[in-house]
Image (tube, helix red, strand yellow):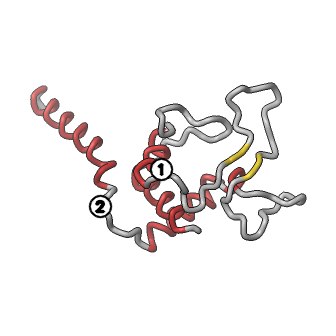
């Protein structure tokens, strides 16, 4: 492959990457399969409920409070100024647009461009996985 052809291909890939976040916003409703994949990622892979769901004294999720936000029951052994003491409610993603939430899960950066506060993982999900997680969370009340 010539340097010119390689350069054209690279420019095309960069354009595609920047176009993808807008492509996800087609206005189509999420499919059942996409929501199911998001549920699998939230429950089985990411463990979102470990922090975002309040637990009873036995460490079990409180019925009716799934992903409604919770005070964290663990913390760092040494003081950490950026540590988040609570996890916000994410069921329905109140206050978040689909695009903002997908961006967070793809980049690990919040709406202001800052890294997420510990213990929140700095996710770098694929576009399709992030869209599935957001579709699932938006489907919750």
Seen in the image, is 96 located left or right of residue 61?
left
Residue 116, x across and y down, in percent: 58, 36
Gap between marks 1 and 2, in whole Å? Answer: 16 Å
Residue 139, disc: none
Residue 79, x across and y down, in percent: 79, 25
The crowding category of the residue bearing disc 1, from other C-alpha atoms within 10 Å (few below 14, some 14 to 19, many at least 20), is: many
Measured along the vertical axis of the image, is residue 7 above or below residue 45?
A: above
x 29%, y 61%: residue: 26
Q: Which secondary structure, mark 2?
A: loop
Residue 101, disc: 1
x 69%, y 64%: residue: 66
Q: Tell me the quadrant of the picture where the N terminus can be found.
A: top left
Measured along the vertical axis of the image, is residue 110 above or below residue 80?
A: below
Measured along the vertical axis of the image, is residue 50 above or below residue 6?
A: below
Looking at the image, which is closer to me, 11 or 63? 63
Seen in the image, is 94 located left or right of residue 67?
left
Residue 20, x across and y down, in percent: 30, 49
Q: Which secondary structure, mark 1?
A: helix
Along the polypeptide, which appears first: circle 1 or circle 2? Answer: 2
Query: Which residue is label 2 attached to?
Result: 26
Q: Tell me the quadrant of the picture where the C terminus can be found.
A: bottom right
- Tell me where residue 118 sits by quadrant: top right
x 33%, y 67%: residue: 28
The crowding category of the residue bearing disc 2, from other C-alpha atoms within 10 Å (few below 14, some 14 to 19, many at least 20), is: few
Give the residue at the far right of this rendering. 57
Give the residue at the far bottom of this rendering. 32
- Circles 1 and 2, Cβ within 8 Å, touching? The answer is no
x 33%, y 48%: residue: 21
Total numbered badges shown on the rendered structure:
2
Residue 78, x across and y down, in percent: 81, 25
């Amino acid at each position: 492959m010539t340097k010119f052809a390689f350069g054209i291909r690279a420019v095309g890939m960069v354009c595609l990457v920047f176009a993808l976040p807008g492509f996800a916003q087609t206005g189509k409703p999420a499919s059942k399969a996409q929501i199911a994949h998001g549920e699998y990622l939230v429950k089985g892979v990411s463990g979102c409920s470990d922090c975002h769901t309040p637990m009873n004294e036995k460490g079990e999720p409180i019925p009716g409070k799934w992903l409604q936000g919770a005070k964290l029951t663990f913390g760092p052994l040494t003081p950490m100024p950026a540590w988040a003491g609570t996890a916000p409610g994410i069921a329905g993603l109140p206050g978040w647009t689909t695009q903002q939430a997908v961006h967070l899960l793809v980049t690990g950066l919040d709406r202001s461009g800052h890294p997420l506060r510990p213990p929140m993982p700095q996710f770098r999900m694929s576009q399709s996985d992030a869209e599935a997680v957001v579709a699932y969370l938006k489907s919750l009340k």
